[in-house]
Amino acid sequence: MNISPPAFREQNLSQASALALAAAIMLVPANFLPVLYTQNAGKIRTDTIFSGIVGLCQEGWWGLGVIVFIASILIPLIKIAGLAWLLIAAQRGPNEDAHRLTRLYVVLNFIGRWSMLDVFLVAFLSGVVQFGLFAKAEPRIGIAAFAAAVVLTVMATEAFDPRVLWERPVTTTPPLHPCHESSR
Amino acid sequence: MKASADINTESPDPAQDSSRGGLVCRECGYEHTTVSLAPGDRALCVRCNSVLVKKSWFGHDATLAFTITGLLLILPSILLPFVTVSKLGNEHTSLLFTGVRVLWGDGLHLLAVWVLVCGGLAPIFLLLCLSGLLMPQRFGWKPIEAPRLLWTSRAVAQWALPEVQVLAVLVALAKLGHVVQVKMGAGFWCYAALAVTTTLAWRDFELNFQLEQPNQRNS
């Protein structure tokens, strides 16, 4: 089905905006609801994403805390802020800052998948730590909200087409050579 | 090693671009003619400087080799013990999808399905699609639904996250180390290798496939 460029732009931007907004909303329960219940030698903890990171740091696992902080808190926030910037810039049509915005889009597209780290982490711990009263790990509803937020941010980035930032090429211009980057 | 570029109109429908057979920049929609490159070389979009194609260092058959290796690793990853943990004499061995079963059992059905998709089904489906695209090309068979397979591969690839799952397991194991005793199983190593081969196969394929059409294979 052929659709005109303005209609395509409008449809593209509304889809991406709706998904980004839904992702931003889902991040609220994802960050405030508990994601993991753990029990170890009588010590019981119910963690949100943030308290889990704090727990890692308190136990001396600073490196792991930083990895989980980047994947679970920083990347979703950067994605939402970056998408908002792209969508606002794209509303104005072909953009003189298209180079930089396209690079931002490529980065957002790449980093999004790493946010699933916390979801896999909870799934793995829940499967492995099953020692009844001695030690146990169970998922909590917050992790479902977090997974939904991650999926929505990935879908929003996919729905956004960076070509809306660029002018349509002129057909009468003579042929050009693409840049060729040699490895040697 | 020069390559020429034609300028055409930009299509509002991304699906139309791939059907014309040229090198279309995925980021800005600028269309170029095909290129001929040496191993390791890259062709960049004249307009936005994004990578259009990159000739693999490993040669023509590397993508297929990574794909077949990945396919061979699927069954051992699923069936062999993933991790064995023990505490106070109790030992518990889990498989790759034990966590999915627990999520399902705790009533988080959608989440269980999603973890299964991203950690298992999507990588397997991606490898099957790649083999469906590459084997006919390699052995001179008649391609079956190549455009549809290509589209499906691109759609599935963004949800195939085995490398993220491997990192999550490593983080979890480091955290678990002082709570329980942990022993990695053969299933984990096979899955880690599956993650590496799937990533390499897709990266190699994504930036190469446009060069590898049969009529340009020897260009």
Image: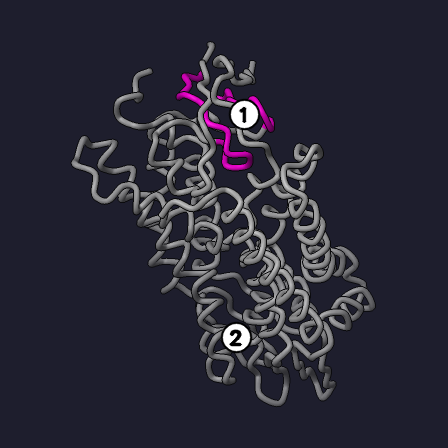
> Spatial distance from mark 1 to mark 2, Cα to Cα?
46 Å
**Residue shown at the point (62%, 39%) measured from the top left:** A165
Task: Residue type at mark 1: give it.
Answer: Cys
Question: Is residue A16 rendered magenta in the image?
Answer: no
Residue A86 in sight in this render: yes
Indicate the position of residue B191 as horizontal and vertical percent values.
45, 55
On the image, numbered disc 2 is attached to which residue?
A127
**Residue shown at the point (59%, 62%) measured from the top left:** A18
Q: Quadrant of residue B87?
A: bottom right
Mark 1 or 2: in front is: 1
- Picture disc at residue A150: none
The C terminus of chain B, quarter of image? top left
Task: Residue type at mark 2: give it.
Answer: Gly
Pointers 1 and 2 within a single chain: no
Indicate the position of residue A105 as horizontal and vertical percent values.
63, 43
Q: Which residues are magenta?
A: B25-49
Whether A155 is drawn above or below A47: the answer is above
On the image, numbered disc 1 is attached to which residue?
B45
Q: Is residue B139 left or right of residue B189?
A: left
